[in-house]
Image (tube, grey):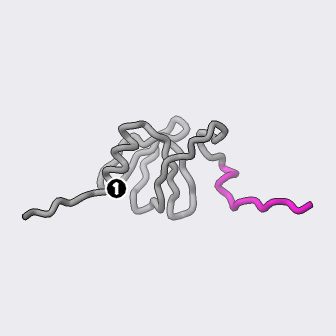
Amino acid sequence: MTKHNINIQDGYLFQSLKEGQIMFLELVTGRHLLGRLKRFDRFAVVLESEGKEILIYKHAIATIALAPASPSAPASPSPSSQSTPSTPSTP
C-alpha cells in the first residue's frame, strides 16, 4: 500500500490564490505584509501589495493568515503601523 503525501501548505496557498483572497503575512523579522497571493512554488511566494509584486522566500515567513474582513481595515499597513504597538494613554 502506498502512502499519499498530503501537503497542507500547498492546499492552503492554492485555495487563497484561486479565491483571490487578501492575505496577511508576518515575516520572521516581525514585518507585516498585506496583499494578494499571485504565485508560489516550493521555495517562495509572490505577493501583490500596493500595486507591486514582492518575492518572499518561504523560510522568511513566520505566519500566513487571511486578512481580517473589516470594512475599516486598510488595504496595506502604513510604515508607522510596523513599529512597536502604542500603549493606551492614561487619564
Read off the magenta span.
Answer: 79-91
Residue 66 vertical position relative to residue 18 in the rendered view, above or below: below
Q: How many marks do you count on the picture?
A: 1
Q: Is residue 80 magenta?
A: yes
Residue 16 vertical position relative to residue 82 in the rendered view, above or below: above
Is 9 left, or right, of 90 in this rendering?
Answer: left
Between 59 and 8, which is closer to the camera in this rendering? 8
Circle 1 packing at 10 Å, graded few (<14), some (14-19), many (20+), is few
Q: Secondary structure at mark 1?
A: helix
Between 66 and 37, which is closer to the camera in this rendering? 66
Is 24 left, or right, of 45 in this rendering?
Answer: right
Residue at point 57%, 57% (across, down): 31
Residue 2 vertical position relative to residue 17 in the rendered view, above or below: below
Residue at point 48%, 52% (across, down): 65
Q: Quadrant of the N terminus?
A: bottom left
Give how far across and how far down residue 68 sits, in percent. Answer: 57, 46
Residue at point 45%, 59% (across, down): 61
Residue furthest right in the image: 91
Is 44 left, or right, of 54 in this rendering?
Answer: left
Q: Quadrant of the C terminus?
A: bottom right
Residue at point 57%, 42% (across, down): 69
Residue kind at label 1, given as amino acid type: Gln
Q: Main secondary structure of the magenta part?
A: loop
Residue furthest left in the image: 1
Query: Where does label 1 land, which residue?
Result: 9
Give how far across and how far down residue 84 sits, in percent. Answer: 69, 61
Question: Which of the 4 image quadrants contains residue 16?
Answer: top left
